[in-house]
Structure formats: structure tokens, C-alpha cells
Image (cartoon, grey):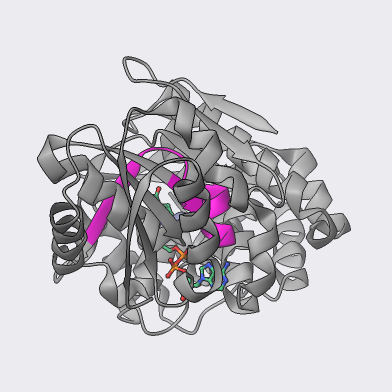
């Protein structure tokens, strides 16, 4: 399955989704680039599993291949790692026309994409996402970057990949906890725009993961095509994220993972919007049943007041209003602006 992403004023690119594609990627990339050298960037969990297969496929396609794996995990998502990735490019003499490859989860994708965006003012990169979250979400849309000491994703650039290759077979080695994280983002995709995907989750989507990936990617690709720089429709992808980010911040990124925090965020905001009469009755129950079915949390002990205070510090708040993504019903996401000082009352009692 191939999905083409056409972003205004930028080169379009294909996302190819096929189980077992990993050993073929080098050959598929060959006609897309004049690159002689390729640096494949991965992390210490993914490299032992898949780096050789991918490196061999690029070598077989005639590329000169170098590799670099950094310590797995969000704590590596720093400017220092970006620097080390660029040093790998330099040591291996990558020029403007050469290529980087991101082989790993969202951390590898974001860092490699960012290093590629700024190295020699920009070189091409290819995404081979290996976590479900990266496959359904982070590898699509061109957002790259890293964390700063002050917070997550505070530094970055928009940089589209040359191509994306998604091999669902690699998910068999993904720890279940990370699998659930990716499911939360796919459930989000269903909740904001794809009622049929949400229904698939209600029936047991884990048996049809290729449809989950295809539908989520297709939806994100369309949204990104319409609104690359997040001036409008792309905001919908933040459903569950305003409260989710606040939970992550409150717990100092040591508590719930991103997908879990987004799951709680989706549930809390929908509970409030249903109380406010902004969401069809019964939607909250459907959402919570779905989250429960995939062992995702839907509630938190953190006081709502603290969450509301942290949420308004979120970078998406502008002026004295905050943009909240709500769902009218399953599959019908929309953006509602509310006054910052009303957020707590809204979360608590659905008053806005
Ligand atoms: N750019 C975007 O638009 C965007 C969107 C959403 C999230 N993100 C970012 O993505 C990151 C989260 O992504 P993630 O959950 O993939 O994190 P991650 O990259 O840390 O991967 C999760 C864990 O799974 C391991 N792993 C990955 N694939 C594996 C496989 N096939 N087999 C075994 N282990 C595997 C990794 O080594 C890591 O330990 C965050 O930094 C977040 O900010 C970016
Ligand atoms: Zn997210």
C-alpha cells in the first residue's frame, strides 16, 4: 500500500506500508536519490534487531553505508545527540546530496530528521519507523526536533522525508507497553476523524494492525497536506494532548508514557465536553470502553486544578484563550477556544 503526501510548495513523498519490506528498502530508495553515501541512525534497542538487514539492503543497492546507534529512550532526545548524529555525517563525509536514514521509534525519527534538516542546511532523510507510535504518527508530517532542559520538543524544524517505509513485521519485537502507546494515537485518529477505524477498535483491531496503520497514516497525511504548519486542521491531531502533556509535565516524564497520558487526556476532555453538552451523550462511555479494552488508562489522581494550570503553560495556548480539541461524536473532532481562566471549571464541571 502506498500513500502519497503532497505538501504545498514542498516535494511530495510516498509512504509505503508492507509487511516484510525491510530488506528491500535500499533498492526502493536507489531510484529516488543521487546519494553515494548513507548514514543509518538507530538506537541501542533497535540496532541489534534490524540494523544489519537495512544496512545490507543499502549496500546491495550500491550505497556506501555508515551506521550510528545512540542509547535508546527519550533521555537521548537532546541537542547533544543531534550533534553526535551530525558528527557521524561529518566523519563519514556526507555531502549535500547524500542521505540519512532513521531506523527506530519516534525518538530516532525526530532526532535524525532534525539533524538532517540542519546539517549543511539540509540533506534528505528516509524514515523507517519501527514502533507503532512512529508508524501511525510521528514518521508522517515532517515535524522533527529534540527536547531542551526546559521541556519536550522545544527545538526543531519542519523537514519532510524523502520517503517512509513501514514494515509491520518489526512490531513483533516491540514491548507491549510501547505497542499500547501507539494504539492510543490510533484510537485518537479514529475519535477525531475516522468512525470506521474507531469501530474496528471496538471489535478488536489488534487482529488487523495493517488496517490500523494504513487508516491512521492516510488520515494524518491528508490533514498534513491541508495544513502543514498547524494553522488550522492539524490542530485536531492534538486531541487529548493538552491534558496529556500536562500529565506528562506534572509527573516530570517519569509517570505515564505519552500514549497513556493522551488516553487520559482524551477521556477527561470528553467527560467535560459531554457534561457541557458539546458532545453526544454516550461518547465518553464508548471512548473509555475502548481505552480499557487496550489496557490504556482513562483517569488520574492528579488534581484537575494542577492539570489546568500546567495545560495553560502549554505552547499551544495563545493570548488569553486556549485551543481545545473536542469531539462532537466519535469521528467528529473540532477545535473550541475557551478562556484560559475557564479551563479548570470546564474540566471539573463542563462549564465554559
Ligand atoms: N514528529 C512528530 O510528529 C511526533 C509525533 C508524536 C510523537 N513524537 C515523538 O516520538 C517519541 C516517542 O516515540 P516512540 O514511542 O516510538 O519512542 P521511542 O523511539 O523511544 O521508542 C520506544 C521504545 O521502543 C523501542 N523500539 C522501537 N521499535 C522497536 C522494535 N521494533 N522492537 C523493539 N524495540 C523497539 C525503542 O528502542 C524504545 O525503547 C517522542 O519523543 C515524541 O515526542 C513525534
Ligand atoms: Zn501524541
Position of residue 330 in the picture relative to residue 135 (left or right):
right
| Closer-to-camera residue (308/93) | 93
Residue 344 occupies which quadrant of the picture? bottom left
Res 240 seen here: no
Residue 269 vs 6, above or below: the answer is below
| Closer-to-camera residue (19/180) | 19
Q: Position of residue 236 (x, y in %)?
A: 48, 39
Residue 324 vs 84, above or below: the answer is above
| Closer-to-camera residue (265/44) | 44
Position of residue 288 in the picture relative to residue 68 (left or right):
right
Q: Is residue 129 magenta?
A: yes
Q: Is residue 340 magenta?
A: no
Res 82 seen here: yes
Q: Residue at x 34, y 72 (%)?
A: 74
Q: Residue at x 14, y 58 (%)?
A: 91
Q: Residue at x 63, y 69 (%)?
A: 180
Name the outermost residue toward the right: 203
Name the outermost residue toward the top: 9
Q: Residue at x 51, y 46 (%)?
A: 60
Q: Position of residue 128 (x, y in %)?
A: 49, 51
Residues in magenta, as a range? 127-146
Amino acid at each position: 500500500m502506498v500513500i502519497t503526501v503532497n505538501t504545498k510548495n514542498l516535494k511530495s513523498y510516498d509512504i509505503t506500508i508492507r509487511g516484510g519490506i525491510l530488506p528491500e528498502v535500499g533498492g526502493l530508495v536507489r531510484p529516488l536519490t543521487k546519494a553515494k553515501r548513507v548514514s543509518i541512525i538507530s538506537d541501542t534497542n533497535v540496532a541489534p534487531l534490524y540494523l544489519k538487514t537495512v544496512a545490507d539492503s543499502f549496500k546491495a543497492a550500491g550505497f556506501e553505508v555508515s551506521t550510528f546507534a545512540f542509547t535508546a529512550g527519550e533521555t537521548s532526545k537532546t541537542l547533544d545527540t543531534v550533534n553526535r548524529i551530525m558528527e557521524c555525517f561529518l566523519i563519514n563525509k556526507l555531502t549535500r546530496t547524500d542521505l540519512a536514514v532513521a531506523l527506530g521509534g519516534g525518538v530516532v525519527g525526530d532526532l535524525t530528521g532534525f539533524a538532517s534538516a540542519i546539517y549543511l542546511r539540509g540533506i534528505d532523510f528516509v524514515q523507517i519507523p519501527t514502533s507503532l507510535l512512529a508508524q501511525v504518527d510521528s514518521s508522517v508530517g515532517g515535524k522533527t526536533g529534540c527536547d531542551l532542559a526546559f521541556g519536550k520538543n522545544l527545538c526543531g524544524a519542519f523537514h519532510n522525508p524523502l520517503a517512509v517505509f513501514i514494515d509491520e513485521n518489526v512490531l513483533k519485537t516491540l514491548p507491549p507497553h510501547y505497542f499500547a502507546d501507539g494504539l492510543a494515537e490510533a484510537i485518537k485518529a479514529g475519535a477525531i476523524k475516522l468512525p470506521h477505524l474507531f469501530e474496528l477498535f471496538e471489535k478488536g483491531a489488534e487482529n488487523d494492525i495493517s488496517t490500523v496503520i494504513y487508516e491512521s497514516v492516510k488520515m494524518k497525511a491528508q490533514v498534513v497536506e491541508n495544513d502543514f504548519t498547524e494553522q488550522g486542521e492539524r490542530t485536531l491531531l492534538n486531541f487529548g494532548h493538552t491534558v496529556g502533556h500536562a500529565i506528562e509535565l506534572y509527573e516530570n516524564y517519569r509517570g505515564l508514557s505519552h500514549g497513556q497520558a493522551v488516553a487520559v487526556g482524551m477521556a477527561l476532555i470528553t467527560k467535560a465536553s459531554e457534561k457541557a453538552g458539546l458532545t453526544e451523550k454516550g461518547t465518553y462511555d464508548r471512548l473509555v470502553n475502548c481505552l480499557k479494552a487496550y489496557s490504556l488508562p482513562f483517569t488520574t489522581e492528579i488534581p484537575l486544578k494542577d492539570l489546568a494550570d500546567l495545560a495553560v503553560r502549554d505552547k499551544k495556548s495563545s493570548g488569553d484563550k486556549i485551543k481545545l480539541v473536542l469531539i462532537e461524536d466519535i469521528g467528529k473532532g473540532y477545535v473550541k477556544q475557551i478562556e484560559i481562566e475557564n479551563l479548570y471549571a470546564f474540566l471539573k464541571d463542563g462549564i465554559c
